[in-house]
C-alpha cells in the first residue's frame, strides 16, 4: 500500500482506517513476506482484554528485515555504527553482511542450547552485536528481553527472573564517554540470584578484566568461530512472542510488556515510513538506546524492515564535547535525526559554536520522543539544528503502544510547536473526563484513551494478564488508558500534557515513583519515603524525595549521598533523586494514602496554593514540609 504523501492522502487514509480497519491493515500487511497468509485480520475484546492481529498468519520477522531485501539492496548499508570514541573506526554493515552476521549469531545461540520459545536476556551496550543478537533471537523463534545496560544488577535480577531467561548475552565492559563500566561484573553479581540462567555469552568490547565462571561463561568470539553464515528462519505464528520489554509502573514491580511478531512488524514499519517520510538511500539516526522501546522499534525493526540505513551510536552527546551529535550527523551525512527533548535541552545550553562548526545541510527531518517538548527547546532545535527548514515530528507513543500513535507526518502536517498533532491512520484517540464521559468537543481536555486496537499494541504483561487488565483497561472500561493527560485544540491538534499517574519521566525515561521509594526505603536509616516529579530544566522532570528517618539525621549531606548511591545501585543512576528533603511526617489522608498533590506542589516551589488539606490526618506536617522545601 502506498503511504501518505500529502495531507489529502492523510485525511483519506485516516478515514479508511476508521471506517474499515481490517481492510486497511490487511492492505498494509500485504506488502510483507508471509509464509502463510492470515485467516482473519483482527480478533479483539477490550474487556478481557484480548487482541490478535493477522490471526493464523505465519512468518519470520527477520525474513522481512533481511532476506527480502537481498535481491535489491545486498550492498546497501543497513547499519552504520559510530563508536564511543571518535578516533575509532566506524563500521558500515551492508544488508548482505547483516544477514550473515545474524545467521552466525543465530547458529551460535542454537549451539548453546537456545530453542524456539526460550527467553534470552540481552544486556549489552550500543554495538552492532546487540542488533545481531535481537535479530538472531527472532530468527530462531527465541524471545529477547533487552535490559538497558545502565540498569543495576538488582534491576537485572528482577527482569531475568520474571522472564525466566535461560541465556544472557553481555560484554566485558561498556564505554560511556571517558568512563568504562564493567558490565560483566554486574551480570556476575546478578546471576547469583538467577537460577534459570544456564549460559552467559560475553562479547569482548573494552578489554576489561573478566572472571569467567566454569560451565556457565563462554566468550562470544570463541563460540561463534566456525558457525555457518546461513541459518534457516523458524516459521512463527503472527501472535508468537517477539520480545518482552520491561517498563516502570505505578507499583515497584516493572511490567514485562509483551509484543508479538506480526502486528508489531507491520506497525513499526508503517509508522516509520509514514512519519519520517523515509526516502530510498537516506541515512536515518535515532539516538535512543536499544534498551528502550524507541531503540527496538526505530533503530532495529522499523528501519530494517523498511530497508533503510540506520545509524547506531555507542557514545554520549557530551563527549568528547557538546558537539558530538552534530559531528556524527555531519560525518555520516545524516538526513533524519530523531532524539529526546532532554538531549536538546542539555545541548541548547552549550555555546552555539558547537553546532555552527558542523555542516548539517543534509538534515531533512527532525524528531523528538519521550516527553512533552517545551516551546523553547522546540524553537532552538528548529532554528539551529534544522536551520528553519526541517519539520520536527513530535512523536507521542509508549512502550505499550509499540510504535508512534499521535505524530506529525514530516513535510505534510502543518506544525504547531509542542503539539504531537494528529493521530496516525488506525489510531482512535478518545479523551475522557473525570466523570468517565467522552469529551467530544474541540477544544477539550482530559485523559487520553484509545478506543480501538492497533497492530503494534502490547498484548499482555508477561505472566500477569490480570495486571494488564487492571492497569490499562479498567479505568475506562472498553478503552485502553494511556496514563497521560491531553488537550485537543479547536483545530483538532493533540497536545500531551504529561502523566496523570505515579510515573515520572526523567530525561525521557519512564520511572515509577513506587520503585524509587522502595529503593530509598532500603537504607537502614530510612523509615518511609514519598517520591514525586518536579519540573527540571534539562531532564524534563527531576526526582524529589521526601524521606522520614527513624532518627533525626545528624549529617544530612552524607545521608543524601548514601541514599543516592543506594538508588543507583538498586535501580540505576538515572533514578537517583535530585532533591532529598528530610521530614518528620508525610501528608496522609485518614485512609493512609499519601496526598501526592501536596508534595508535588511543594516540589514545584508552590507553597501558597496547596488546595484543601483538611482531609489530612495531621495537617501540621504540611507546614513543616513547606518550611523545609528545597
Ligand atoms: C510516556 C511513555 C515512546 C518511547 C519513549 C518513552 C511520554 C512519550 C511523548 C511526546 C509527550 C511523551 C508519555 C508516555 N511521552 N512521547 N512526544 N510528547 N509525552 O516510552 O518509557 O513507555 O514512556 O512518555 O507520558 O506515556 P515510555
Image (tube, rainbow, N blue to C red):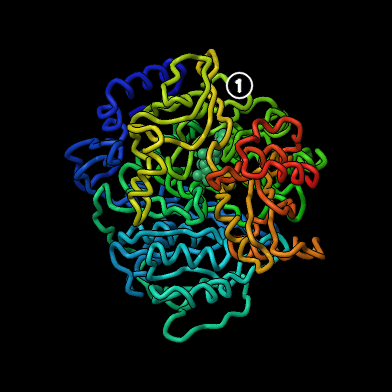
Q: Toward which corner of the image does residue 463 lie, by quadrant?
A: bottom left
Residue 204 picture location, percent across and down: 55, 72
Q: Residue furthest bottom?
A: 214
Among the 4 quarters of the image, the one containing residue 388: top right
Left or right relative to 508: residue 274: left
Secondary structure under the numbered disc 1 in the rendered image: loop
Q: Is residue 597 shown left or right of residue 194?
A: right
Q: Residue at x 60, y 21 (%)?
A: 416
Q: Nearer the viewer, residue 523 or 570?
A: 523
Q: Residue at x 29, y 62 (%)?
A: 117
Asked if 83 appears above or below 608 in the picture, the reply is below
Q: Is residue 570 left or right of residue 133?
A: right
Residue extending furthest toward the left: 39
Which residue in the protein does label 1 denote?
416
Q: How many marks?
A: 1
In the rendered view, tell whether residue 509 sits above or below residue 446: below
Picture quarter with the N terminus: top left
Expressed as whole percent of the image width and height from the top left, the position of residue 456 reads: 37, 40
| Mark 1 Cα-neighbour bin, 10 Å: few <14, some 14–19, many ≥20 | some
Amino acid at each position: 500500500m502506498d503511504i501518505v504523501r500529502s495531507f489529502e492522502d492523510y485525511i483519506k487514509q485516516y478515514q479508511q482506517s476508521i471506517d474499515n480497519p481490517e481492510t486497511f491493515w490487511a492492505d498494509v500487511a500485504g506488502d510483507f513476506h508471509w509464509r502463510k497468509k492470515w485467516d482473519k485480520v483482527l480478533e479483539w475484546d477490550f474487556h478481557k482484554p484480548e487482541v490478535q492481529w493477522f490471526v493464523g498468519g505465519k512468518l519470520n520477522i527477520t525474513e522481512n528485515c533481511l532476506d527480502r531485501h537481498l535481491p535489491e539492496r545486498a550492498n546497501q548499508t543497513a547499519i552504520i555504527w559510530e563508536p564511543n570514541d571518535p578516533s575509532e573506526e566506524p563500521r558500515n554493515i551492508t544488508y548482505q553482511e547483516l544477514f550473515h552476521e545474524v545467521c552466525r549469531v543465530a547458529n551460535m545461540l542454537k549451539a548453546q542450547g537456545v530453542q524456539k520459545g526460550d527467553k534470552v536476556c540481552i544486556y549489552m551496550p550500543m554495538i552492532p552485536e546487540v542488533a545481531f543478537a535481537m535479530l538472531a533471537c527472532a530468527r530462531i523463534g527465541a524471545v529477547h528481553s533487552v535490559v538497558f545496560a545502565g540498569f543495576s544488577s538488582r534491576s537485572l535480577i528482577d527482569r531475568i527472573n520474571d522472564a525466566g531467561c535461560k541465556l544472557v548475552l553481555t560484554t566485558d565492559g561498556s564505554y560511556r564517554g571517558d568512563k568504562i563500566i564493567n558490565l560483566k561484573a554486574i551480570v556476575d553479581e546478578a546471576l547469583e540470584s538467577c537460577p534459570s540462567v544456564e549460559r552467559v555469552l560475553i562479547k569482548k568490547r573494552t578489554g576489561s578484566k573478566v572472571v569467567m565462571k566454569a560451565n556457565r561463561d563462554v566468550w562470544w568470539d570463541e563460540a561463534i568461530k566456525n558457525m555457518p553464515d546461513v541459518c534457516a528462519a523458524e516459521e512463527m505464528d503472527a501472535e508468537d512472542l517477539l520480545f518482552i520489554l520491561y517498563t516502570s509502573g505505578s507499583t515497584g514491580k516493572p511490567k514485562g510488556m509483551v509484543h508479538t511478531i506480526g502486528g508489531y512488524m507491520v506497525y513499526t514499519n508503517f509508522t516509520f515510513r509514514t512519519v519520517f517520510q523515509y526516502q530510498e538511500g537516506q541515512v536515518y539516526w535515532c539516538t535512543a538506546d536499544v534498551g528502550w522501546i524507541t531503540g527496538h522499534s526505530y533503530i532495529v525493526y522499523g528501519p530494517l524492515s523498511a530497508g533503510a540505513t540506520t545509524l547506531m551510536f555507542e557514545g554520549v552527546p557530551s563527549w568528547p564535547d557538546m558537539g558530538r551529535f552534530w559531528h556524527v550527523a555531519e560525518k555520516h551525512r545524516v538526513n533524519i535525526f530523531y532524539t529526546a527533548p532532554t538531549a536538546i535541552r542539555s545541548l541548547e545550553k552549550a555555546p552555539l559554536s558547537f553546532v555552527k562548526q558542523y555542516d548539517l545541510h543534509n538534515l531533512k527531518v527532525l524528531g523528538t520522543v519521550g516527553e512533552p517538548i517545551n516551546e523553547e527547546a522546540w524553537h532552538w532545535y528548529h532554528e539551529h539544528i534544522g536551520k528553519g527548514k526541517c519539520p520536527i515530528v513530535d512523536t507521542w507513543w509508549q512502550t505499550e503502544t509499540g510504535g508512534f500513535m499521535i505524530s506529525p507526518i514530516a513535510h505534510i502536517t502543518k506544525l504547531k510547536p509542542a503539539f504531537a498533532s494528529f493521530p496516525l491512520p488506525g489510531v482512535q484517540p478518545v479523551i475522557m473526563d473525570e466523570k468517565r464521559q467522552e469529551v467530544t468537543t474541540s477544544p477539550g481536555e482530559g485523559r487520553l484513551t484509545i478506543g480501538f486496537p492497533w497492530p503494534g499494541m502490547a498484548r499482555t504483561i508477561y505472566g500477569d494478564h490480570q495486571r494488564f487488565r487492571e492497569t490499562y483497561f479498567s479505568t475506562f472500561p472498553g478503552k485502553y488508558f494511556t496514563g497521560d493527560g491531553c488537550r485537543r485544540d479547536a483545530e483538532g491538534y493533540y497536545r500531551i500534557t504529561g502523566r496523570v499517574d505515579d510515573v515520572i519521566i526523567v530525561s525521557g525515561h519512564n520511572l515509577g515513583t513506587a520503585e524509587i521509594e522502595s529503593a530509598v526505603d532500603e537504607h537502614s536509616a530510612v523509615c518511609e519515603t514519598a517520591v514525586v516529579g518536579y519540573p527540571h530544566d534539562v531532564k524534563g522532570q527531576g526526582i524529589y524525595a521526601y524521606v522520614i528517618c527513624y532518627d533525626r539525621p545528624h549529617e544530612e549531606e552524607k545521608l543524601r549521598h548514601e541514599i543516592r548511591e543506594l538508588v543507583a545501585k538498586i535501580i540505576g543512576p538515572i533514578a537517583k533523586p535530585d532533591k532529598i528533603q528530610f521530614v518528620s511526617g508525610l501528608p496522609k489522608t485518614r485512609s493512609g494514602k499519601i496526598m501526592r498533590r501536596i508534595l508535588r506542589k511543594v516540589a514545584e516551589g508552590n507553597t501558597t496554593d496547596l488546595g484543601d488539606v483538611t482531609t489530612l490526618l495531621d495537617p501540621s506536617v504540611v507546614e513543616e514540609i513547606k518550611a523545609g522545601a528545597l
